[in-house]
């Protein structure tokens, strides 16, 4: 059961990306990481994506102790933003294409040459563009409209990205989730726009309407900052987790945002003991060369290599979670 995995501090959550609606990629990621030992899969609030994840689980042959978490965002949350390239301003320097962790920008860069289904809103292209040719637009969804069908499809957790400054907006969306779903809920929160006191007050308010240990707090250090496998990259995730841990909330905690194979080691040295680790960018990156191949499903050798590469990460994370419970 999910409660046992969280309670035993043995959770590995693969973040496919709240904005990642590439069903082919999601199916392959879930297949590979299910085989490798991941037990929770974070997905976009999209029925086709959920179907793809279930197909990936079915193909892996490992369904028991595998759980689906659907993430939703609100206005101001970068996870639900999509990049747009202005062809008139673009100088075709390819800086955006080179830095995109999702390969969401095509060779012939034009205003409509961003693969919207692959774009996860990380904003890296926006930061490197020296010509002001890239903007982002928010793709907010009506939760009351989309969630009933998603819940009926069969999921195990709903996550709200509660990272914006607007307390009213967060409270309104949190109440909707509580009204529609009686299973596990997750609060994804970071310090990009909120101070430590604001974060703790917000979490306390959100947990006030929840039963103890029916909620997961995802301490997002630096959202979508992963890629490098070093201590500096994961430092903010551990720091965010320390703040949450010291508050002793009646909830489970995951570390996220810049997480990698060094996260558990650094967390342990800092006295931070989460229920698990959620890894997105780095986990996707290390298997991308395998899952992007057109012969992935027909080539058993390629699938095996992808699984072994993913296992190196999942084993490092899970086996090092030898925390005292």
Image: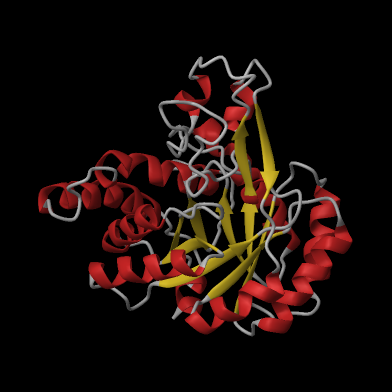
Residue 55 at x, y percent in the picture: 32, 69
Residue 57 appears in the rendering: yes
Which residue is more in the foreground, 98 or 304? 98
Q: Image quadrant for the N terminus?
A: bottom left
Which residue is more in the foreground, 11 or 87? 87
Q: Which residue corresponds to the image point at 70% horizontal and 75% vertical from the top-left?
A: 144
Which residue is more in the foreground, 315 or 141? 141
Q: Which residue corresponds to the image point at 69% horizontal and 43% vertical from the top-left?
A: 137
Name the image quarter holding residue 193.
top right
Question: 196 left or right of 295?
Answer: right
Q: Is residue 172 above or below residue 28?
A: below
Which residue is more in the foreground, 253 or 227? 227
Residue 276 at x, y percent in the picture: 50, 60
Q: Which residue corresponds to the image point at 50% horizontal and 77% vertical from the top-left?
A: 155
Name the image quarter holding residue 286.
top left
Question: 25 left or right of 185?
Answer: left
Residue 57 at x, y percent in the picture: 31, 69
């Amino acid at each position: 059961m999910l409660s046992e995995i969280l309670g035993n501090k043995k959770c590995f959550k693969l973040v496919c990306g709240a904005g990642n609606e590439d069903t082919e990629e999601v199916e392959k990621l879930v297949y590979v990481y299910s085989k490798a030992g991941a037990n929770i899969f974070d997905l976009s609030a999209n029925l086709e994506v959920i179907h793809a994840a279930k197909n990936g689980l079915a193909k892996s042959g490992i369904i028991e102790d595998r759980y689906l978490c659907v993430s939703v965002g609100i206005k101001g949350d970068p996870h639900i933003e999509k990049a747009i390239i202005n062809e008139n301003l673009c100088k075709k320097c390819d800086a955006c294409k080179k830095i995109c962790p999702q390969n969401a920008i095509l060779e012939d860069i034009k205003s409509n040459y961003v693969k919207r289904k692959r774009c996860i809103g990380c904003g890296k292209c926006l930061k490197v563009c020296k010509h002001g040719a890239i903007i982002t637009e928010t793709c907010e969804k009506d939760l009351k409209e989309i969630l009933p069908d998603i819940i009926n499809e069969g999921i195990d957790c709903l996550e709200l990205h509660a990272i914006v400054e607007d307390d009213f907006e967060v409270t309104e969306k949190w109440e909707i989730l509580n009204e529609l779903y009686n299973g596990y809920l997750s609060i994804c929160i970071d310090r990009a726009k909120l101070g430590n006191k604001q974060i703790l007050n917000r979490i306390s308010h959100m947990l006030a309407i929840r039963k103890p240990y029916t909620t997961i707090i995802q301490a997002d250090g630096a959202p979508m900052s992963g890629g490098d496998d070093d201590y500096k990259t994961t430092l903010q995730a551990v720091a965010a987790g320390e703040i949450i841990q010291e508050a002793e909330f009646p909830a489970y905690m995951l570390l996220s945002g810049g997480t990698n194979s060094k996260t558990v080691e650094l967390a342990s040295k800092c006295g931070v003991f989460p229920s698990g680790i959620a890894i997105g960018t780095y986990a996707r990156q290390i298997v991308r060369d395998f899952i992007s191949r057109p012969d992935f499903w027909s080539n058993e050798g390629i699938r095996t290599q992808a699984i072994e590469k993913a296992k190196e990460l999942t084993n490092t994370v899970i086996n090092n979670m030898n925390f005292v419970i």
